[in-house]
Image (cartoon, helix red, strand yellow):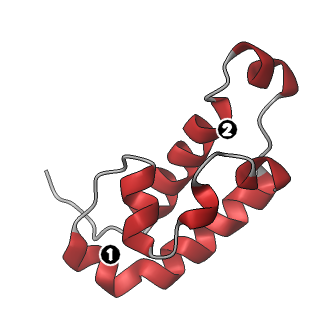
């Protein structure tokens, strides 16, 4: 998970909302208020399970940020109320 802490600015994040704003992940504040701890716990687990490929890091310096953004989005979506179309 060392790769995550090497993303510039990530060490300054101190609230669930700050993570969502930093990674530009849209969220509903009311929903997040009720599930922020489970979302962040799942995000942490996903971060530990995923590592950006080294060659992607060399080609795309934003690869870690993009991976973290995707993992945060997936974690949040997992806790969204069921949507009916």
In the displayed structure, 18 sits above or below 85; it is below
Q: Is residue 33 left or right of residue 83?
A: right
| Secondary structure at numbered mark 1 | helix
Q: Is residue 54 left or right of residue 30?
A: right
In the displayed structure, 32 sits above or below 58; it is below
Q: Position of residue 25 (x, y in %)?
A: 36, 50
**Quadrant of the image containing the N terminus:** bottom right
Say which residue appears at 43% left-offset and 79% top-offset: 36
Say which residue appears at 45% left-offset and 76% top-offset: 15
Q: Which mark is residue 64?
A: 2
Between the residue at mark 2 and the residue at mark 1, the CA separation in whole angstroms equals 23 Å
Q: Which residue is mark 1?
A: 32
Asked if the residue at tag 1 contacts the one at tag 2, i.e. Cβ–Cβ closer than 8 Å, the answer is no
Q: Which mark is residue 63?
A: none
In the displayed structure, 54 sits above or below 9; it is above
Q: Position of residue 43 (x, y in %)?
A: 60, 64
Say which residue appears at 61% left-offset and 76% top-offset: 41
Q: Which is closer to the viewer, label 2 or label 1?
A: 2
Q: Which quarter of the figure has residue 79?
A: bottom left
């Amino acid at each position: 998970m060392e790769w995550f802490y090497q993303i510039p600015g990530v060490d300054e994040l101190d609230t669930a909302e700050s993570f969502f704003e930093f990674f530009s992940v849209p969220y509903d504040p009311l929903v997040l208020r009720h599930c922020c701890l489970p979302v962040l716990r799942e995000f942490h687990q996903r971060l530990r399970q995923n590592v950006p490929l080294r060659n992607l890091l060399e080609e795309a310096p934003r690869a870690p940020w993009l991976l973290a953004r995707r993992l945060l989005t997936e974690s949040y979506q997992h806790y969204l109320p069921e949507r009916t179309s």
